[in-house]
Image (cartoon, grey):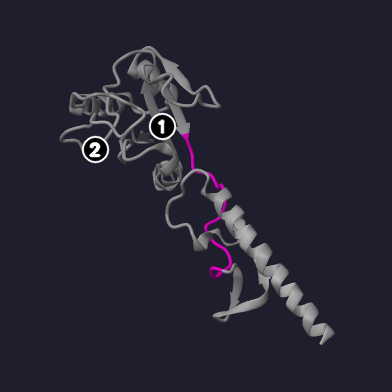
Amino acid sequence: MVNRDADRFYDEGEDFWPKRYAIWGRLVAHQPGQIGYSIIDSKAIGHFMPPVFPGAQANTLPELARQLGLDSERFTQTIADYNAACAPGQFDHTRLDNCATAGLTPPKTHWARPIDTPPYYGYALRPGITFTYLGLYVDDTAAVHFAGKPSRNLFVAGEMMAGNVLGKGYTAGVGMSIGTTFGRIAGQQAARAAQQEKHHEVA
């Protein structure tokens, strides 16, 4: 992954993509022009989900740089430095393998293989919003807090309170899990609150 200046800026092999893709959104947002470019060669084809958009394709790295609007000399040097740092290992895209770079900053700690087999591919990446990390403060009963005190009859779930659970990252599927889990809790609590209100009215 390189930025608009054709520089790498983070460890692409830190962990599996379901745990890291939200992290990459934040990282790309801090790059010049809020854009990054995923660079692969033909060896990588078939080891990941096919992209929605075709991206750029070229038989040489300078041509790929031209298509992406990157400085060709800087880009080819970045790739050359990366390739030279790739240490031998047993590549396995299904686990955290031992293919890593040596003496490179930032490192690539897993799945590091030289980008040396044409055709080469480049995909422009920009940050986007899946949902906000902000929301209402709730406790484990899904009750909304006002001035530090839980409401008797207002409960929320899903995106309205996801920030209570999520930190800086996001793992694939967690949003649905939060909605499902706290939806059930909120529903139970709301039903209980409604029954109590009805009881008070009768009394």
Bin the neighbour count of mark 1 within 10 Å (Cα to Cα): few under 14, some 14-19, many 20 and up: many
Give residue 84's position: percent from left, percent from top. Answer: 18, 25
> Which of the marked residues, 1 or 2, is nearer the chain's N terminus?
1
Whether residue 135 appears in magenta in the rendering, the answer is: yes
From the top left corner, tell me how far across and down residue 91 is, in percent: 28, 24
Picture residue at 58% right of the left edge, 69% below the top: 141
Q: Amino acid at mark 2?
A: Pro
- Does 200 appear above or below 175? below
Residue in the foreground of this view, choosing between 87 and 10: 87
Quadrant containing the C terminus is bottom right
Occupied quadrant, residue 192:
bottom right
Which secondary structure, mark 2?
Answer: loop
In terms of secondary structure, where does tag 1 sit?
Answer: strand
Residue that extends furthest to the right in the rendered view of this protein: 202
Residue 107, disc: 2
Q: Mark 1 or 2, which is nearer the eye? A: 2
Magenta: main secondary structure equals: loop
Specify the segment rendered in magenta. Answer: 125-140
Left or right of 91 in this view: 4: right
